[in-house]
Amino acid sequence: MPHLVRSTLWLGFFGAILVAWWVMYAMSVDMDVDLIGRPGEMGARMAAMDPRMPMYMPMANFGPLFAMWAIMMAAMMLPTLVPTLRSYEDLMVSANGTRAGWLGVLAGYSIVWVAFAALITGVQLALLFGGVIDMLGISKTTTFAGALLIAVGLFQFTRAKEICHGVCHSPMTYFLGHWRTGFAGGLRMGLGLGAFCVGCCWGFMALGFVGGVMSLLWMGLATLFMVIEKLPQIGHVVTKPMGVLLTLAGLAVLAWPFVNGG
């Protein structure tokens, strides 16, 4: 029976990830955004629209936009939680953990990322109505795109990134220092882990404003890198090289108008 419960929970977990990705794919197709974030014919018309026009535009309203970000959080961040949930399972025998506690960790982690989805929804609406990004969440200027790439790249070298990544990279250490039993205990630990994870990965979410928040290519690459960052064997060696790449990419984006104009 314990094995059946474990298998059922893991199947449900991965099923939720697959559903989230399917929904994001369907939304991307519906909004006519290609794999590198460029709008197709319908998307281009939507991107060109003035968000102040007296008509209903889902991506200019908090509710639909928040739902999109919440589903995106599930698609992108749940895969990164696998090492953490496996670490909790390793402690289930030696530290009287339970499946209820496992679910609590998952719930707490999800709550934090849903809260972040609400925050970044507000940021996107502010950027949209401020004329910085278009209706599809794509930067209108190379200045903003380049500056954002550089900011996220430099963040990879900060002490805050080091601390947050240390917790995400070694969840076992966090569990041993903050161990609580039962669902409530798992929820509390999940909230803490989620907070550190937001601190570690917020920049890769913000980079959606460079290539388009509905770009499946951006979502896939960001998810892949965040998963790699959390792998025990290699996670600690990829953080700073990625910072270098992002910073160089930002400088290239800023320089492109001058090079192209010349």
Image (cartoon, rainbow, N blue to C red):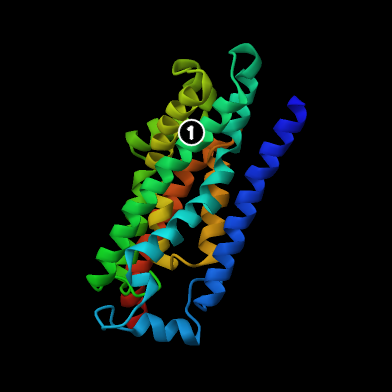
Residue 253 in sight here: yes
Expressed as whole percent of the image width and height from the top left, the position of residue 38 reads 48, 76
Question: In terms of depth relative to the viewer, which is nearer, 260 or 63?
Answer: 63
Q: How many numbered discs, if any?
A: 1
Question: In terms of depth relative to the viewer, which is nearer, 38 or 113?
Answer: 113
Expressed as whole percent of the image width and height from the top left, the position of residue 196 reads 40, 35
The quadrant in which residue 22 appears is bottom right
Expressed as whole percent of the image width and height from the top left, the position of residue 141 reads 30, 73
Looking at the image, which residue is at 61% across and 51% down?
Answer: 17
Expressed as whole percent of the image width and height from the top left, the position of residue 148 reads 33, 58
- Apparent side of residue 236 relative to residue 98 in the rendered image (left or right): left
Which quadrant of the figure contains the N terminus? top right
The quadrant in which residue 69 appears is bottom left
Question: In terms of depth relative to the viewer, which is nearer, 122 or 208?
Answer: 122
**Dot 1 alpha-carbon crowd within 10 angstroms: few under 14, some 14 to 19, many 20 or more:** many
Looking at the image, which residue is at 45% across and 61% down?
Answer: 68
- Apparent side of residue 205 relative to residue 151 in the rendered image (left or right): right
Looking at the image, which residue is at 36% across and 75% down?
Answer: 135
Q: Give the residue at mark 1.
A: 168
Residue 232 in sight here: no
Q: Is residue 246 above or below residue 38?
A: above
The amino acid type of the residue labelled 1 equals Cys
Q: Is residue 152 above or below residue 250?
A: above
- Apparent side of residue 11 relative to residue 220 in the rendered image (left or right): right
